[in-house]
Structures are given as C-alpha cells and as structure tokens.
Amino acid sequence: MCTVPEYYIGLMSGTSLDGVDGVVADFSGTKPQVLANASCSFDADFKAELLALNSPGANELHRAAMAGNTIAIAYAGVVRQLLAQLTARNLAAGRVRAIGAHGQTVRHQPRLNSPSTGDIGYTIQLINAALLAERTGIDVIADLRSRDVAAAGQGAPLVPAFHNAVFGQSHKMVSVLNLGGIANLSVLPGAATLPVLGFDCGPGNALLDAWCQQHTGAAFDAGGDWAAQGHCLPDLLQTLRNEAFFDQTPPKSTGRDLFNVSWLKKKLSNFSSAAPNDVQATLTELTASTCAQSVKRYASESSVLIVCGGGAYNKELLLRLQHALPGLPVQTSDDFGMPAQQVEAAAFAWLARQTIHRQPGNLPSVTGAAGPRILGAIYPA
C-alpha cells in the first residue's frame, strides 16, 4: 500500500443548483479518506440564471460564458477554504495534485437521433476551467463527461465506479442511491466477475425543490416536513409516472432537459385544485417509488441500500423509500464512513486521479460506451 499522501480536490455543483460542494481526498490508502470539506451557496439570481440556461434563450452563448466564469470563481473560493483547512491541520496543501471540477450541467443530450452524427449528442457543463487553474495554481481536470458521450455512451452516471471502490462489499450486492437533483442508482454486485450497473432513475430533488420554492419561498423542503403534512394523490402520481423514461432499460440518463418546471406544469394541468402540500407529497412519492422500482428490477438481491446526496437528509423521502422496499435496510452513507453531502465531490476527486494516472473513469456496463475511456481535459496550472 502506498504511504505517500496523494491528495486530490473534487468540486461538484449538481442539478439541484444549490451551490458548490468540495472535498480534499487522500487516495494513498485502500479506501479514499476525506481530509477537508467546504461548500458555498449560489445566490438566488445566479440560480435563476442557471435554470434559464437549461432552455434556449436570448444571447445564451454570452450568458453561458459569463456563468462559466462565475462558477469558476465560486469553485476557486471553495478551493481556498479547503487549502486553509489542510494548512490548519498541518497537512501539506502543496501535495494536492489536481482538481476534478464537474461544472454546472445545463444541457444533457447524449442521443440526438441525427444521422449526420451517428446519433452522438452532447453534454454541457459550464465551467471556465482555465480561469479556475489560473485562480488556484493547481491543475484542473474538467469536461469529464464528453469523452464517454463521444464513445457512444450516456456520459452519466460516472459515480458508480467510485461507489464500488468505496462502498462495494465482497460476496454481497450493495446498491447506492444518489439523490441529487436527479436520482441515480449504482448496483455493486460484490463479485469481480459481474459488471457494476448504474443509471439515472428519474427526478431526485429537482422537482421537489422547485415546487417548494414556488409555494413556500424556501429553497428546499427541509427534512421533507412540508411533504409530510400533505397526502399523496394517486391519480396525480399515475400521471407523473406516465413518462417513457421510467420504463426505458439502462443504460439511460436524464436531467433538467426533461424533468423541469415546464414538464411539471403540463402534468399538473388537470390538477389545478390540488393543495400545494399534497402535490409536494406526491412528488416525494414519485421520487421514492421510481427509485424503489429501479432497485426491485435491477438490484433485488441487495443487502443494503446506501443513500447519499442532499436527498439523504429528507426524512420523509427516506421513510417512503423504506416503505417501498420492505426488508431492505435503507441507510445513509454517513453510516458507512462518508457523509452524504461529500460523496459526489469525492467521486470527482477520484475521477481526476484516474485522469492523471491515465486510467479509465467510465464503466461501459453503466454508460453503454464502446469501451473504457480516460475522461476529461487537463488545464495545467
């Protein structure tokens, strides 16, 4: 086992649009160890701009470039916090080898059904990686999804390989559910001869947060308390679940291109008299039931469902997951040594390390890519 510290920073801003999470992880041991973590929030105006950039609009190329600058500056601020924590612990901040910077996804269209491109689409994460390298003085690895898409993959999810490294157990199937803006499931088979599976299940927090903010002014439904005051509406739930994506077979991925406020508004057109908290309860059940359906279909032999991401702190959502999966323990990643809010950022630190070591970061069994690929573009400091 290598005993020389091997530090990487991972920075993640997900489809929940709540801000940036960052970690410093040490990969010198058998399991990665998080040494420092920090975060910053996006203000309301910038969050609104990022939401707007998910759809075509006026002068969007300029606006996207400026948003990429803002994200890079926010990322750099989180890096400063992380390095200060290392210094305070008398750990050598200069040992940080690289930053894995996810950027902010505003479009995710891995398939376009276009004969001219052979059905290859694109995925866009806003980040001025050159500016981040300039501000931090550390090599930056960005654009981590595009190579997988170029190889006919979905470009997402990329975290299952990391989940397997951290949470995989010998001779036991384990499932990991990441509840960000979009929910994705990793199926870790527990046997080296079997492939790791992973795919997006559907909406995680994206619709829950949007509806909560619209009707309460709060950025999210803390603990799921507002949803717990409402009642699930069966007819509305069936309408919401009447979406082709839920029945597609993996590999599959999705984002705000599909599950957005406009989609929800159309689904609610015949439910104008529904109480807002009943809609919130139904949206919570939508996330829980579609995730549970994925577990039942593809991970029925799991010994545990490990939940991470911001949704892991939604008690009502976890209760509904447990109700939908009787007999399967539903636990947060905190119980397995890594706080739920740190897992995805740590995954992008791991992806940066894979790139630096010229090792593949994708899993073709997950994304459907033509083969293993080294991911990302390197921006030297």
Image (tube, rainbow, N blue to C red):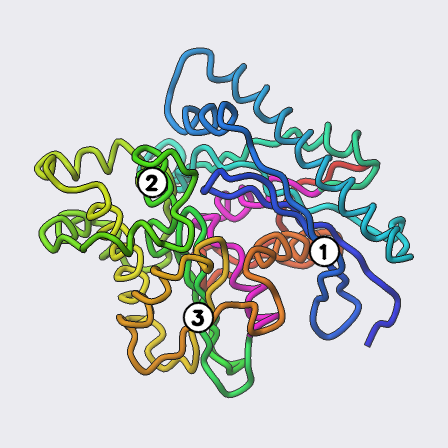
Residue 28: horizontal and vertical position, in percent? 80, 68
Residue 177 lies in the magenta-colored region: no
Q: Is tag 1's residue or tag 2's residue first in the polypeptide sequence?
A: 2
**Residue 208 spot, x, y in % from top left:** 33, 45
Query: What number of labels is visible?
Result: 3
Disc 3 residue type (three-letter): Val
* Image quadrant occupied by the N terminus: bottom right
Question: Mark 2 or mark 3: which comes first in sequence?
Answer: 3
- Residue type indicated by callout 2: Cys
Q: Give the labeled residue for mark 2.
A: 212
Q: Is residue 291 left or right of residue 365?
A: left
Q: Quadrant of residue 305?
A: bottom left
Q: Secondary structure at mark 1?
A: helix
**For the magenta stretch, what is the residue range?**
141-167
Q: Nearer the viewer, mark 2 or mark 3?
A: 2
Report, in whole angstroms, how far the alpha carbon at label 1 lies from the one at label 3. Answer: 23 Å
- Dots 1, 3 in contact, CB < 8 A: no
Residue matched to label 3 = 187
